[in-house]
Amino acid sequence: MSRLTDFFQQLSKRRVIRAGVLYAAGVWLALQVADLLAQAGMVSDDFVRWMILLGLIFFPITLALTWFFEHPWHGRPWLAMVADISMLLIVTLAAGLLAYQQWTKSFTRPVVAVLNLEPTDAQPGTGDLAGHLASRIRMLLATMPELQVLELSSSQHRSLNALPVDEKADLLHADFLLAGTLNQSRQNLRASIQLFDGDGDLLWSDRFSDRMINQQQLQYSIMATAWPALGLDESGLLRVRELIRGCAYPADENAVKAIATIEGRLGGRETHSLQDYERMVLKLDALIGSTEEKGLLYLLRARSRWQALNLSPAIKRTVLQRLVMKDLEDTAYLCPTHPDTQLYRLRFTRALERQDAGAADLLDRYPNEASIRKSLARIASDNGDTETAIDLARQAFELDPLAADMFCFYRQLAQASEDSAWQEQLARVSGNAGGTNDCQP
């Protein structure tokens, strides 16, 4: 025991411990700075790896040199003081850098854009299936509060079609862009998915193949493989798995294609007649009567009936309203975890406009839903809370920067308020690539 005590006394006397701590703190700080430079593209990843290797190699060399050449410290107290001050400064800088990294990591949400998945064959329905898959990927990512996931109306806007990836990222202010292709092969679907950073550099790419009726398995495979590249933790992936499992697809290829086709028509930009929506309802009626997994079909029928309700004579609207709510109740029973179930109920019942729903709870449940923020911004503006209205409107714009109605939405709120702060917000959204400044009264 006395030998061990003597050894540690010698380490202290020869300043070996001091030198080791000073060296480790200095190397750690240098590596953190190098890592930040590498993320900014100013140095390569190989440079950082060489720094780590050299840091490890010279650590024992530094300790050995300090042991054998301790005499520079003797009789020079000022040198020891300089070393102590240097060590304190390095440790303080390192702690400050760590705090900064944690702060930015905690309060900055990476912006993700799900671009179009392009069909690569001429078979009927491939484009609809590609659109459905992209929509599902966006929906699943949008449940993650750690991410800011753009609305498809912006990330798949037609103005982006001819642009390279880096220009799309600039226009959308996106940190990550997910793109890919899809094709059919007999009863199988083959997807090629890529993830790009904001500079247009490829971060990750993979291919996936599964039977068309195995939509849930295909979607989970894509999410599980892309998850590490997005920097998300395992607990979030477990939540996504439960969301996917919570609403089964019909075990019928034609039903899956019909879901993709009707969903695409309901979410598309083109307008449809009352007869078009009634034909969609009849198609869904037949599918519901012939399959056991009806949850997604009920949800689409509710959406189709709602669109028909808006175009129907007044005498039919009460009945259609009840049928819509019955479909939503059936959807909630069969697909209780589906994010759209409650969202469409809020929209169809106009609960937001009546202020029946709690704002904080809605924002937590729908961290990436622009329409929620628009509705709450209008409510805040009507209540005279301009600061909250501006903040919610800003969030809506960030989630859907190319929305066609964004400028008109802002101008409507600005006209309802005398606060000059709205003018700055109007200038921000004026002339956005997907919108219009021609607002009809």
Image (cartoon, grey):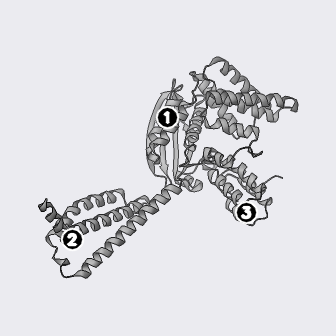
Q: Reading the chain from its start, which is encountered first: label 1 or label 3?
A: 1
Query: At 64% across and 46% down in the image, what residue appears?
Result: 361
Q: Is residue 38 above or below residue 78?
A: above
Instruction: Identify which amino acid the numbered label 1 is placed on.
Output: Tyr
Q: Is residue 154 above or below residue 9?
A: above
Marks 2, 1: nearer the viewer: 2
Q: Residue at x 68, y 34 (%)?
A: 265
Q: Residue beneath label 3, please?
A: 422
- Whether residue 386 sits left or right of residue 240 in the image: it is right
Mark 2, residue position: 15
Name the image quarter holding the N terminus.
bottom left
Q: Which residue is mark 1?
A: 220
Q: Secondary structure at mark 3?
A: helix
Specify whether residue 270 is in view. no
Dots 1, 3 in contact, CB < 8 A: no
Residue 27 versus residue 177: which sits nearer the camera?
A: 27
Whether residue 257 is visible: yes
Residue found at x 73% / y 64%? 423
In front: 272, or 365?
Answer: 365
Which mark is first along the chain, 2 or 3?
2
- Amino acid type assigned to the residue bearing label 2 in the image: Arg
